[in-house]
Amino acid sequence: MSKRAEQKQSARVVRDQIARERRRRRTLWTSVIAVVALVIAGTIGYGVYASQRPSSYTAPPGATDGGAAVAVGSGPVKIDLYEDFICPSCRRFEQESGATLDQLVAANKVTLIYHPVAYLDRFSSTRYSTRSSAASGCAAEGGKYREYAKALFERQPPEGGAGLSDDELVAVGTGLGLGDTFGQCVRSGKYTAWTAHVTDVASKRGVTGTPSAYVNGKPTETNPQAIVAAVEAAGR
């Protein structure tokens, strides 16, 4: 190969190397720009989400646990109950354990700490979990949380539908003796932000499903036998 040919070949190799390096840099900068764009978009998206969330909430009078729950009873052993009003397993729990819980409260052995969470809004077309939880806050304001919660489980709508309307939620309370103030509370969504707070607190504590029960802070099975055994053990 002549000297000139060798020079041309060397120059071609150098040009190819330069071209490859340019392509590599272009790819690198394209990736960097894409990542930065995603970070910016995510930051903006979170900012929009955060701005749309309620910045404050009103808890029902007498709410406990930092405003994240409603207390029923005054016994020494605390039973924290996490329930969602559209959850079929919660309805079954109330059917099976409700009488036992009432007996424990009547005997002044326990305080029931209710956390009406809204985990299952996606299972209704009208965010029924949130609306029913907010309505239960109105019932708590009227001093009838437990009665209202029982009534909602008795009338629990099927998953996937609209759930009870606001008027129907009001009618349930009216049947329990809750008056006009209750109706106004439900229709105004007074405790909607409170429901979000209750749900957020539960999530941060690692509560991932409903129903969930804790006796003096210790998780227990959601059946009457397990709850009674846990209460007796806690009271020793």
Image: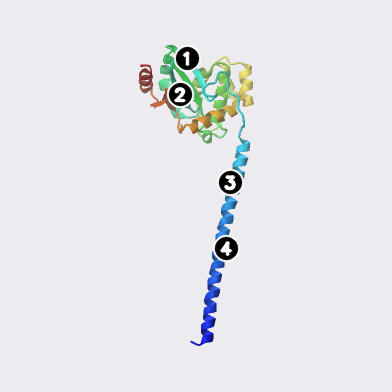
Amino acid of disc 3: Gly
At mark 2, the secondary structure is strand
Q: Name the residue under label 1.
A: 74
Q: Mark 3 points at which residue?
A: 42
Q: Quadrant of residue 59?
A: top right
Who is closer to the viewer here, 14 or 114?
14
Is there a contact, CB below 8 Å, between mark 2 and mark 4? no
Is label 4 in a helix, a strand or a loop?
helix
Comparing marks 3 and 4, which lies closer to the viewer?
4
Nearest to N terminus: mark 2 or mark 4? 4
- Callout 1: few (<14), some (14-19), or many (20+) C-alpha neighbours within 10 Å? some
Query: Residue at 44% of width from left, 12% of height from top?
Result: 106
Pointer 4 residue: 26
N-term mark: 1 or 2: 1
Q: Distance between the residues labelled 3 and 2?
A: 36 Å
CB under 8 Å between discs 1 and 2: no
Vertical comparison of 46 with 14: above or below: above
* Real-space CA distance between mark 4 and mark 1, rounded to the nearest whole angstrom: 69 Å
Q: Which of marks 3 and 2 is nearer the N terminus?
A: 3
Question: Amino acid under label 2?
Answer: Asp
Q: In which quarter of the image is the C terminus?
A: top left
User: Residue 131, located in which quarter of the rendered image?
Assistant: top right
Q: How far is mark 2 from mark 4, CA to CA?
A: 58 Å
The CA span between labels 3 and 4 is 24 Å
- Where's residue 136, x and y in %? 55, 23
**What separation in Å lies between label 1 and label 2 (alpha carbons)?**
13 Å
Q: In this view, does 33 lie above or below 48?
A: below
Whichever of labels 3 and 4 marks the residue nearer the N terminus, that label is: 4
Q: Which of marks 4 and 1 is in front?
A: 4
